Amino acid sequence: MDTALQVLVAGVTNGAVYGISALGIVVVYRVARIVNLAQGEAITIGALGTWWLDQQQGWPRGLATIAAVAGTGVGYAALSWLTVLRAGRAARGGPAAMPATLPASLITLALALFVQGLVFFAFGRQLYGSPPLVGWSPVRLGDAVLPAHTVVVALVTAGLAAALAATVRWTMVGRAMVASAENRLGASVVGVDVTRMIVLAFAVAGTLGALAGVLLSPVTVFSYLTGFGFALRGLAAAALVGFRSPGAGLAAGIAVGILEAAVSTYVASGYQEPVVAAMLIATLMIWPRLAPSLDPR
Amino acid sequence: MHRWIRTWCLVGALVLSAACGGDSDDKAGRAGGAAPPTPVRLGAIFNMTGPNATLGQEELAGVEAAVADVNRRGGVLGRPLELVKADAASDPQKAATEATRLMDDPAVVAIVGPDGAQMTLPIVPLANQRGIPLVSASAGFLGRVPAEQLRWVFTVGPDFASKGLPTFIRYWQGKGFKRIAVLSNQTPVFDLVTSFLAKAAPAAGLEVVGAESFPPGQPDVTALISKLIGRNPDVLLVPHVGADVATVLKNYGNLAPKGVELTTNAATANRRFIDLVGEPVMEGVVLNGWKAMVVDDLAADDPARPEIERYRQGVEANGQTFDPASSAIVGWDGVMVITRALEQAKVAERAAVRDALERVDFQGAMTHWRFSAAEHDGSPAGAVWVMVQRVAGGWKRVDS
């Protein structure tokens, strides 16, 4: 029981980060039909940016966090507007022309490497760690220990899910994004600026990624390469739900995290990655309708 | 358009000629300086960049401090030491290329470094082909190279598995510990440690009650720690190095199990690492430390004391902050071993230095170095380290 709860705790801490990445990836995919491979770098920038503002520039932690997270969102919006939106546009022409899926996705990979280079230039190869978000004393539940940090991660993740649902349901922007996701041509006919929605989707993805980085930085340590690996697992979670629903992406990320923790604890710790990958492939084979819809509409 | 191309060609040509010109000026300068005694050139190859750079930069700092110290004391053979640096870049291929560059300079009499078996292995055959003594800071390569390949290769490397673990085992026996659990990331050190313990533990009356590993970069390993703690070990050994140790320590801090001694690798003792994870997380951690970390706990007549004092002064005189836990001590002793060999050889020639290295027998800051024709590894197993514990922001010797 002790260990089972601990597996759950570790799974949620890791999985929330995969889930938030998956959330960002799905939002971008739904609106822009682009697989955003630069999602992980937002995690890195969120973590290292906060560290730099807080530890080096002497900003209060809260302000540093807000600035780094918002800055990453704005930066991602700007980068997407400058690069991704232009991919394939010339080839197709016309005002409703959208970035072509494959070239634009590859551009996001180039962006990921570019941002990695920038972060490397600024931070070098050193490792960086942040002090804990909340005090040190963990919450004890019988024999098991619930680190205060995990509680924060769970709360923030739940808050994100609620905020996302509320935005989609009750705000104009949210509805416009859903409309763009459902049918871009139709959305643009009724006056939704789809280009703006795509930029907005990248802003959301950047913000979410940075937030994941902030959540993660106190538990582990960061280098300029750290984010990429998390985003790959987020990508796996997004693929698992066929890039269809952001909420499902979040849930799938958490599920992947728990699966990883369970495999490494109960099956064989050394084979965690291949076992989890095999399970993902098997899931997609058993339920092929889960596989990503590459409908370019 | 054409004019542009021409302009750029011109600029390119200028840049190139400037670069080449700088190089030849440099050579002329070296050859021309006849008045003062020509320096003895020492090659130093370490991982200045790449994933292992933290360790490499420390070791290089030790090398630099040692060279400065030797020169302050009048040099060697009446000539100053001159350091030629190369970056192994944590990359075996780069290490080989850079080592070749050092070897191609006929004035370089010996090379110190690099650290890491992977970086040393490609250099070993090169050192033999070109006949230049290599004093590696790694010892992990020894078991993987046939003896005849070691003619030109020596080591001051404190190998964790073969040299550190015997120290641990003696300490555990002394404390009456029986049950050992191992948690590491999936790197070769996990296999080295588990296979070493599988052989050595039963003979020492120890039992490995669990050994788990996780993929590098995993941010939360609480579940694995919890699983291992469930086996009631006396010791949780965390033998790997780098970012993943920080994760384990942070997670362990949350669980705070009772009656389990957390034991890590010496590489987690340096200032940078402690700042990274925070002092509260390090409190109580036991690891294999240099004698330099616990000078006050050494016997008053311990022969290492004066050498450690010289090392401390040398580092500070070179403008560096002295961190007794730093691996700079490996670089320092590496240079001191070569300097001793040069003195014994009485001539700065590669072959003579190689022969003299086999006769080096002296007390360094790390340990007492004894090389021979049969033993190119200068430190006997279990003699490099002492067991230390982090207590109230300092180190305390716990084995003695």
Image: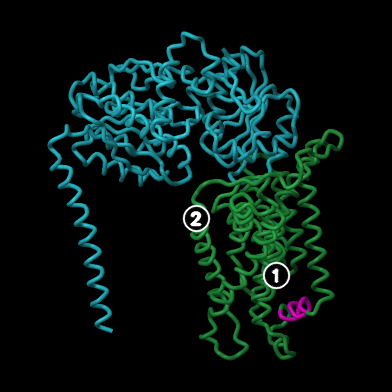
Chain colours: A green, B cyan
Residue A243 location, quadrant: bottom right
Residue tagged 2:
A120
Q: Is residue A244 left or right of residue B16?
A: right
Check the residue under mark 2 and report the chain it is in.
A
Using the image as rendered, state which of residue B393 and residue B57 is in the foreground.
Answer: B393
Residue A179 counted in the magenta span: yes
Q: Is residue B311 above or below residue A27?
A: above
**At 83% across and 74% down in the image, what residue appears?**
A169
Q: Residues within 10 Å of mark 1 (few under 14, many from 20)?
A: many
Residue B231 counted in the magenta span: no
Check the residue under mark 1 and report the chain it is in.
A
Which numbered marker is on residue A27?
1
Q: Is residue A269 left or right of residue B20?
A: right
Give, as a single range, the part of the protein colored magenta: A173-180
**At 80% across and 37% down in the image, what residue appears?**
A145
Q: Is any atom of residue A153 visible in this view?
A: yes
Q: Report x, y in % for residue A83.
A: 54, 75
Residue B311 location, quadrant: top left
Kind of residue sitting beneath label 1: Val
Residue A9 location, quadrant: top right
Look at the numbered disc 1 and give the secondary structure of its residue.
helix
Q: Is any atom of residue A285 visible in this view?
A: no
How many numbered callouts? 2
Q: Report x, y in % for residue B326.
A: 49, 31
Q: Is residue A68 left or right of residue B344?
A: right
Look at the numbered disc 2 and give the secondary structure of its residue.
helix
